């Protein structure tokens, strides 16, 4: 990476770095003289390029469709859970009805047996 002499002079004027230190700082901050100067003024606030997130930025359209997708996924999940609960309830009701029918048939059979005697 070529370092511009004017940029080095600017950094030297704004800081107390010498030429070699200014070049090293420029290389460290990808030739961004503002980052070099800001880092000199307040070194705790500026992150170096090693800590920058390398994920690509999303466009507004990508963010919108991502939210739509999340909403639809959540809705589908909630519908599936609701449907499973309803199916379980219906199954329990059917089992109860079957048991009631069996009980009625037993009672009917018992009455028939008693009437035979």
Image (cartoon, rainbow, N blue to C red):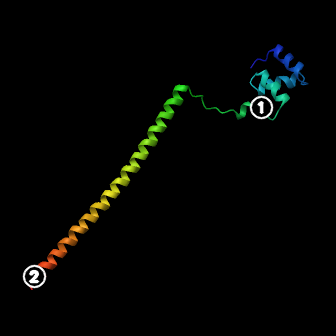
Mark 1 and 2 residues: CB-CB less than 8 Å, in contact? no
Picture residue at 30% right of the left edge, 59% below the top = 91
Other residues around mark 1 within 10 Å, as few (<14) / some (14–19) / many (≥20) = few
Residue underneath mark 2: 115
Please tell me the numbered disc located at residue 33: none
The answer to whether residue 54 is left or right of residue 36 is left
Vertical order, 33 against 63 (above or below)? above
Question: Spatial distance from mark 1 to mark 2, Cα to Cα?
Answer: 97 Å
SS at circle 1: loop
SS at circle 2: helix
Which of the two residues, 95 or 115, is positioned nearer the viewer here? Answer: 115
Which of the two residues, 36 or 106, is positioned nearer the viewer here? Answer: 106
Picture residue at 87% right of the left edge, 23% below the top = 20
The answer to whether residue 87 is left or right of residue 76 is left
Picture residue at 83% right of the left edge, 24% below the top = 37
Quadrant for the C terminus in the image: bottom left
Can you give x and y, in whole percent of width and height, for residue 63 in the image? 54, 30
Can you give x and y, in whole percent of width and height, for residue 94 in the image? 27, 61
Other residues around mark 2 within 10 Å, as few (<14) / some (14–19) / many (≥20) = few
Quadrant for the N terminus in the image: top right
| Numbered-mark total | 2
Residue underneath mark 1: 46
Which residue is the extreme one toward the bottom? Answer: 117
Res. 52 image quadrant: top right
Vertical order, 43 against 116 (above or below)? above
Can you give x and y, in whole percent of width and height, for residue 11 in the image? 85, 20
Picture residue at 8% right of the left edge, 83% below the top = 116
Can you give x and y, in whole percent of width and height, for residue 98 in the image? 24, 65
The tag earlier along the polypeptide, 1 or 2, is 1
Q: Nearer the viewer, mark 1 or mark 2?
A: 2
Res. 49 image quadrant: top right
């Amino acid at each position: 990476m070529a370092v511009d002499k004017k940029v080095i002079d600017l950094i030297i004027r704004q800081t107390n770095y010498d030429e070699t230190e200014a070049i090293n700082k420029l290389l460290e901050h990808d030739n961004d003289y503002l980052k070099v100067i800001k880092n000199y003024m307040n070194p705790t606030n500026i992150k170096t390029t090693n800590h920058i997130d390398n994920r690509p930025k999303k466009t507004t359209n990508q963010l919108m469709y991502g939210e739509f997708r999340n909403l639809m996924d959540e809705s589908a999940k909630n519908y599936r859970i609701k449907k499973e609960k309803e199916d379980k309830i219906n199954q329990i009701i059917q089992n109860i009805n079957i048991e009631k029918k069996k009980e009625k048939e037993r009672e009917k059979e018992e009455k028939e047996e008693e009437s035979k005697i």
